[in-house]
Amino acid sequence: MAETQSQNRIHQALEKPGKLLSIYYTAGFPNLEDTVPILEELQAAGADMVEIGLPFSDPLADGPTIQESSTRALRNGMHTELLFEQLKDVRKTVDLPLILMGYFNPVLQYGVEAFCRKCKEVGIDGLILPDLPLEIYQRDYQHLMAPYGLSMVFLISPQTGEARIRQIDAASDSFIYMVSSASTTGVQDQFGQGQDAYFDRIHAMELKHPQVVGFGISDAQSFQKATRTAKGAIIGSAFIRLLEREGLGGIRNFIENIRP
Amino acid sequence: MSKYHVDEHGFYGEFGGAFIPEMLYPNVEELRQHYLEIMASESFQQEFRKLLRDYVGRPTPLYYAERLSEKYGSRIYLKREDLCHTGAHKVNNTIGQILMAKRLGKKRIIAETGAGQHGVATATVCALMGLPCVVYMGEVDIARQAPNVARMKLLGAEVRPARSGSRTLKDATNEAIRDWINNPEDTHYIIGSVVGPHPYPDMVARFQAVISEEIRHQLLEAEGRTDPDYLIACVGGGSNAAGTYYHYLDQEEVQIIAAEAAGKGVDTGESAATSALGRVGIIHASKTLLMQTADGQITEPYSISAGLDYPGVGPMHAHLFQTGRAQFIPVTDAQAMAGGRELARLEGIIPAIESSHAFAVLEMGAVPPDSLVVINLSGRGDKDLQTYIDYFDLT
Ligand SMILES: Cc1ncc(COP(=O)(O)O)c(C=O)c1O
């Protein structure tokens, strides 16, 4: 069972009425120094939450868009210590809930405990480490990470069995990241019947924690579909394509178009 | 259970596990729950043994290499995996896994390949069983391993270029894993070595264990004892080595030597000597030793041999290294090429360049005289002819 954490910014955002719009982007892309300016733009544009991606050389759960942004970010010179350095004063200007999302190996190399301590120091609220599965987290790392009070967010997919979903719900303390379909990030298929059935099935389980849907959401329509039953949705690849196309100047328009 | 085999959590000491994203959990968990039971079933064993005998050509000979023995003053036997159908040990594993896939009701097969040997072995068993086969291969490797690409295509497989990252084996493996995420129900991923998430390292080791099972019988017949003094194999991901060592792991008096690819030299920046250069980390969902930057980005290895050109090593081998059970010896390109040529000239056998690394440790003095030695000859050198030609200027 997860400790009940004192309220952090994620909890507060989840308690607000209405649907929650979360944005994912890769730190260090398109330019090395864009990390905080992107956050400030997102806040001004009215996004509700942000996942900052720590780039990794081998992002095996990601599709081509995020792979490419990660490669570019690394080439630009992004690394873990630099990201923390960039975020050092972020809480002076940004009040959004911030989640770091990354693969486990860079965290392991930084030192799991040191990583969490640093997150806490700069004002990160939660972590998504997609390749650190629940069992290994609980057995080997929870005791190191829990003291820093970060919300650990776990994923479920359409193939996740009911018992396991309940287990993940019990281990969560903020929201459940609901992967929209059996896919890597950015796969652009339609939100079809299968997904509606999946969304309804999860909704009917009356989980303790709200769900935020991610993977494949790109515009107002898919955002609406994804949030019919879920509390919110995450846009990643489509946002990265926007940054590639228009740079930071396109952010406000993009967010306003998703949620008029 | 032995301290060198996998524990109930899927770890070898601190190494191994299944660091998988949740999207892979159902696939990997299904395999984990069923693989031991399926492998133990009589019908599986019958079919597996029959195919190994009639199709692969097992048992492969344990050949006493007289002239090589004479030169090094030891009794040296070669385990002839080069005589397997498709030319390397890889097929032992693909036969096992295709039968596993059928019993799990899978209808589609995916695989990764570097040099193309595992891709060919997978395409072969897919043809045998009439299953569609997609092989991911780095764009760079496709260009430098054209004959194996052609073989796979002739066998009916689709070869998909991996265009991400460094466009070699590690990226092909990433692409195969992504394919599996996108096809969570009908697809089985035939991984090519003792790498990847648990239960793959253990399952692949068990399929390859037929190598050491045969060595024990054959050595008993030839020498009146089951155990050699030294066992030598090359290690890329570590599947031929795992098979060679498997039944000897707990016989601590049997010395185990792992030849790893040092490329142009351990300290040249162009090397694949994972035990020397790697640190603990996670690659392809397994905690093991791997070559990486201080920041945890996986780096690109180098070896003249495409089959040893992997930045990690199977978790079993990381454990054997860490516990000192196996001695890891880095072998440079030059040492390996000389070892390969020596085998050709002394015994009339042209080895795969991967296997040549195992022979090179003789010249390096790793084995004292008067030893009883078994070297696993993991594959034949046909696929490497062009490299031999270029290296020794044989035109
Ligand atoms: C002949 C041969 N030996 C060895 C290897 C290395 O793989 P492993 O370490 O899994 O045996 C390969 C891989 O392609 C190979 O083709």
Image: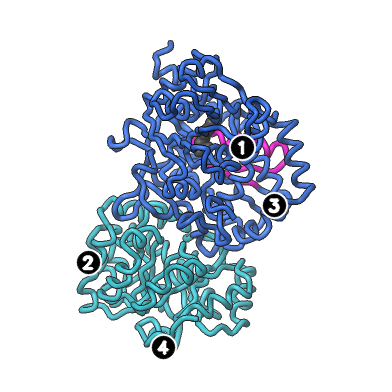
Chain colours: A cyan, B blue
CA–CA distance between discs 2 and 4?
A: 29 Å
Residue located beneath label 4 in the image: A16
The chain letter under disc 2 is A
Tags 4 and 3 touching, CB below 8 Å: no
Q: In which quarter of the image is residue B376?
A: top right
- Quarter of the image with the C terminus of chain B is top left
Which residues fall within the magenta stretch? B109-136
What's under tag 3, amino acid-wise? Lys
Q: Do labels 2 and 1 share a chain?
A: no
What's under tag 4, amino acid-wise? Lys
Are there few (<14), some (14-19), or many (20+) residues within 10 Å of tag 2? some
CA–CA distance between discs 3 and 1?
A: 30 Å
Residue located beneath label 3 in the image: B106
The chain letter under disc 4 is A
Q: Which of marks 2 and 4 is in front?
A: 2
Tags 2 and 1 touching, CB below 8 Å: no
Q: In percent of the image, x 77 and y 41: which residue is there?
A: B47
Can you give x and y, in whole percent of width and height, for residue B244 in the image?
57, 37
Question: Camera-side residue: B392 or B240?
Answer: B240
